[in-house]
Image (cartoon, helix red, strand yellow):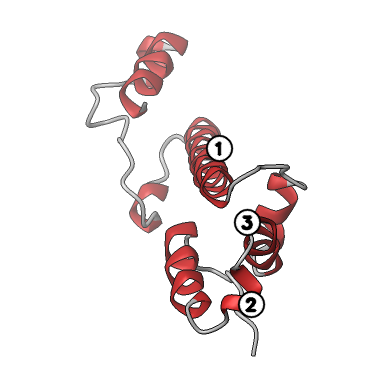
Amino acid sequence: MKLSQGTKSMKEYLHAFNNLARYAPEFVNIEAKKIASFQRGLSPKMLNTMGTGAQATFNAYISDCLTQENNNNNYSASKSRKRLLKLDRLNPGHQWWQNVSSIVLLPQVLGFDRRREGTQGIQRIKSHTR
């Protein structure tokens, strides 16, 4: 049996790893072994972003992983917002936002009328979504 991150968040994977590490101390008795064991179960995306990560301690490596996961999530969220804004510009009358599962600030809620305000209104939306 092998522990892998899969779709778990970094915190969930870390919790599962620490629980299982108690039963296999020979794999985690040295910092380098603990980091290597943890890396083996990381998702391919996280492993790719982390690279080889030459950290001296397990805690420093985990801190870097958590920071990188947060950066990845922020990047994905910003791409989603850009995609939604682009969709609104391409199809102004369509109520595409009804099918979106995440919370989106609607142009109507912000008092934005693209036909009157042009790009200044888009800037106002961007400042509200940050």
| Residue 47 picture quarter | bottom right
Q: Report x, y in % for residue 4.
A: 61, 74
- Residue at image coords 67%, 68%: 37
Mark 1 residue type: Tyr
Regarding mark 3 in the picture, which secondary structure is present there? helix
- Give the labeled residue for mark 2: 26
Camera-side mark, 1 or 3: 3
For residue 27, side relative to residue 109 (left or right):
right
Mark 2 residue type: Glu
Mark 1 vs 3, N-terminal side = 3
In this view, which residue lies farthest toward the bottom? 1
- Residue at image coords 30%, 21%: 112
Q: How many marks?
A: 3
Q: Report x, y in % for residue 61.
A: 59, 47
| Residue 60 picture quarter | top right
Mark 2 vs 1, N-terminal side = 2
Q: Are marks 2 and 1 in contact (CB under 8 Å)?
A: no
Label 1: few (<14), some (14–19) or many (≥20) C-alpha neighbours in 10 Å: few
- The answer for how far apart the CA atoms under marks 2 and 1 are is 38 Å
Front in this rendered view, residue 74 or 10: 10
Mark 3 vs 2, N-terminal side = 2
Regarding mark 2 in the picture, which secondary structure is present there? helix
- Give the labeled residue for mark 3: 31
- The answer for how far apart the CA atoms under marks 3 and 2 are is 11 Å
Front in this rendered view, residue 32 or 65: 32
- Residue at image coords 65%, 74%: 27
For residue 54, side relative to residue 57 (left or right):
right
Front in this rendered view, residue 106 or 47: 47
